[in-house]
Structure formats: C-alpha cells, structure tokens
Image: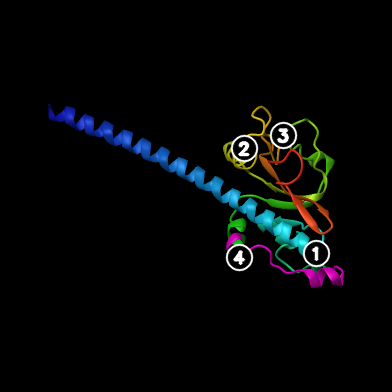
Amino acid sequence: MPPKFKITIIAVISFITLILSVREFDLYKKTKESDDLFELIEVFKESCQQYAFDIGQYPREHFDVAYSNFLAHNLIANPANYEVDTSTMLSWNGPYIEERFLKRVYMYPGIIRIENFIETSEAFDLDSDNYPEIKGKGCYVTFSNVPLDLADSIDKKIDERLSNSNWQTTGKVKYSEKTHILSVLLVWNIIKGKVLDSNAGGGMS
C-alpha cells in the first residue's frame, strides 16, 4: 500500500473518530441538561409541597439575578422579611431549597418563576381533552430560554407523551416555541391541610 494512501486512510479514520466524539459529547451534554433541569423541577415540587404544609399557602419564588432585590423569595427567606402576619412567620421552616440547588438555580441562563396562582390563560389540560381543568390556587414553574429539544425531553420524562400531537399544550408540561418558555405544573389544591400534587386526581399519571 503506497504511503500516501495509508496517510489518507489514517486521516479519514481520525476525522470520523473526531466527528463521532463530538456527537457523543453533544449527546452527553444534552442528556445532562435534561437530567439537571428535571432534578430542579422535582426539588421545586417538594419545596412547594413542604411550604404549603407548613404555611397553608402556596409560595411565590422568582429567580432573576439582575432583579433579585425586587422579586418574591418565599422559599428561601422568612416571610417575616415581608411584614406578613405572625402566624405565617412562625410557621415558616425554611429555607426550603438546599444551597447546592440554589447555586444551580442562579447559574441558570434565564429567569425561573414559581407562581402560586394558575390563571385561566395558564391553566393545565392534564388529560388532553381540550378542557384545561387545573387552574386557581396552585404552583407551577416557568423557565425562560428553553430550546425545543430540551422541552421535548422534559415532557417525555414528566408526561410520558400523554399526547404526541399536542404535547406542547397538554399535560403537566407546556411549551411555547415563540417565547421559548417552559411551564411545568408542580402542586395544586389544598384540601384539609393536604396537598394534592400533579400525580393525584383524575387524568394524572
């Protein structure tokens, strides 16, 4: 085999190896991003549940590094700082989010908002019947700057493809390709001190 031909073969093999390595790294990166975001969602869910058990209300939590001084922080700061009633102040048993997760939250390249009321326009259609039944008091979280493939992977983890045709608008996960905002239902409805979360009730998986 001529030396030039050998060099060509080695170069081709090296190039193919490089391409496969890049693809493998890209797949690893996307998988890690999905796993990390899913873990944060689970942390938020547990935090909102515990806050609701302690306080009897749902929390609001806005994470935006640029405007942190002007946003609600019910999960990481005692409500006494906001001059609420004494019973709420004494019932608060936080912070409800561990510091190791807070570091990850503040490294997120966007805005994270946990809302304590689900407006009609933000209601969730859990069983894909075109009737958004989950609205009113409850918690859901929104993430800005979420690419479509990441939103798709989160939907598969949480909704397990409740509906392939309209996954972006039904189930516990919603996504807007226009705004790149991902919304996830966390917990909803307090009955006699017990929290019903998105794994309870009709039409929930």
Instruction: Give me the C-alpha separation between circle 1 and circle 2.
Output: 32 Å
The first of marks 3 and 1 along the sequence is 1
| Quadrant of the rendering where the N terminus is positioned | top left
Residue 88: percent from left, percent from top: 83, 68
**Label 3 Cα neighbours within 10 Å, binned few <14 / some 14-19 / many ≥20:** many
User: In what element is the residue under mark 4?
Assistant: helix
Q: What's the coloring here?
A: rainbow
Residue, disc 3: 169
Q: Which mark is residue 99?
A: 4
Residue, disc 1: 55
Q: Quadrant of residue 11?
A: top left
> Which one is nearer the viewer's eye here, 14 or 100?
100
The first of marks 3 and 2 along the sequence is 2
> Who's the residue at 83% across and 54% down the image?
191
**Label 1 Cα neighbours within 10 Å, binned few <14 / some 14-19 / many ≥20:** some
Instruction: Give me the C-alpha separation between circle 3 and circle 2.
Output: 14 Å
> Who's the residue at 72% across and 56% down the image?
62
Instruction: Give me the C-alpha separation between circle 3 and circle 1.
Output: 31 Å
> Which one is nearer the viewer's eye here, 25 or 159?
159
Residue 197: percent from left, percent from top: 73, 50
> Which one is nearer the viewer's eye here, 114 or 197?
197
In this rendering, the count of numbered labels is 4
The first of marks 4 and 3 along the sequence is 4
